[in-house]
Image (cartoon, helix red, strand yellow):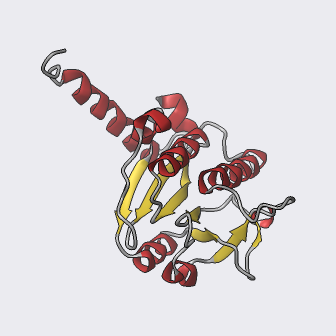
């Protein structure tokens, strides 16, 4: 646990807005955890939360902090107030190539609903929009694939900048204690009936 937490990107977040396919949501969690993302924000205003498929997440969602929101504007404003630059992955005229963004600072990437995309309030209150350029006939990638592509670039930039080197601080110590406490609680829980 310590080795994972030492490299966790505590100032890198993913925002999932109104996704309806539980496989997409789960795949994004799995990619987020694999790339060292510390937090996922769930914004569900226009759609019902589909839940998570544990088989798809491979239980990685347990190692990512989750915060729920019911208003995209409040979510975006809160992240910006915390010092994060909020980028919405969107096919807009203003969108820039995701590789041209500096992901080394506190950043959040917003991934929107499969058909309708990101809501107007989220677009309006984000810091900017990014796009993954296409070289074929496809206009866009599946939302979970898009997440993996963007997070891969964010982590690449952070490695080059030396931000993935192991380090320890009070926030990481709190996270470590939280994880250990949770695991101890699970170990102490009585087995379910029939086990």
* Residue closest to the far top: 195
Q: Is residue 85 above or below residue 92?
A: above
Instruction: Residue 53: give x, y in percent of width and height.
Output: 41, 41
Q: Residue at x 12, y 20 (%)?
A: 193
Q: Is residue 37 above or below residue 140?
A: above
Q: Nearer the viewer, residue 81 or 36?
A: 36
* Residue closest to the far right: 135
Instruction: Residue 179: give x, y in percent of width and height.
Output: 36, 35
Total labels drawn: 0
Instruction: Residue 82: give x, y in percent of width and height.
Output: 48, 69
- For residue 116, which quarter of the picture? bottom right
Q: Is residue 144 above or below residue 8?
A: below
Q: Nearer the viewer, residue 126 or 81?
A: 126
Can you say which quadrant of the picture contains the C terminus? top left
Q: Residue at x 19, y 22 (%)?
A: 188
Q: Residue at x 17, y 25 (%)?
A: 189
Instruction: Residue 113: give x, y in percent of width and height.
Output: 52, 66
- For residue 115, which quarter of the picture? bottom right
In the displayed structure image, the side of residue 7 where residue 70 appears, left or right: left
Q: Nearer the viewer, residue 50 or 125?
A: 50
In the displayed structure image, the side of residue 127 where residue 15 appears, left or right: left
Q: Residue at x 80, y 66 (%)?
A: 100
């Amino acid at each position: 646990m310590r080795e994972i937490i030492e490299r966790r990107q505590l100032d890198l977040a993913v925002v999932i807005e109104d996704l309806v396919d539980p496989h997409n949501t789960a795949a994004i969690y799995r990619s987020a955890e694999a790339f060292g993302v510390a937090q996922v924000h769930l914004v569900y205003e226009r759609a019902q939360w589909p839940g998570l498929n544990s088989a798809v997440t491979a239980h990685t969602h347990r190692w990512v902090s989750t915060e729920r929101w019911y208003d995209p504007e409040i979510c975006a404003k809160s992240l910006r107030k915390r010092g994060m630059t909020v980028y919405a992955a969107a096919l807009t005229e203003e969108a820039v190539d995701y590789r041209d963004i500096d992901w080394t600072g506190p950043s959040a990437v917003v991934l929107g609903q499969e058909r309708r995309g990101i809501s107007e309030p989220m677009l309006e209150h984000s810091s900017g929009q990014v796009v993954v350029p296409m070289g074929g006939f496809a206009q866009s990638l599946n939302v979970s694939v898009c997440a993996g592509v963007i997070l891969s670039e964010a982590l690449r930039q952070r490695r080059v900048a030396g931000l993935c080197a192991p380090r320890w601080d009070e926030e990481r110590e709190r996270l470590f204690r939280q994880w250990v406490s949770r695991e101890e609680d699970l170990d102490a829980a009585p087995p379910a009936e029939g086990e």
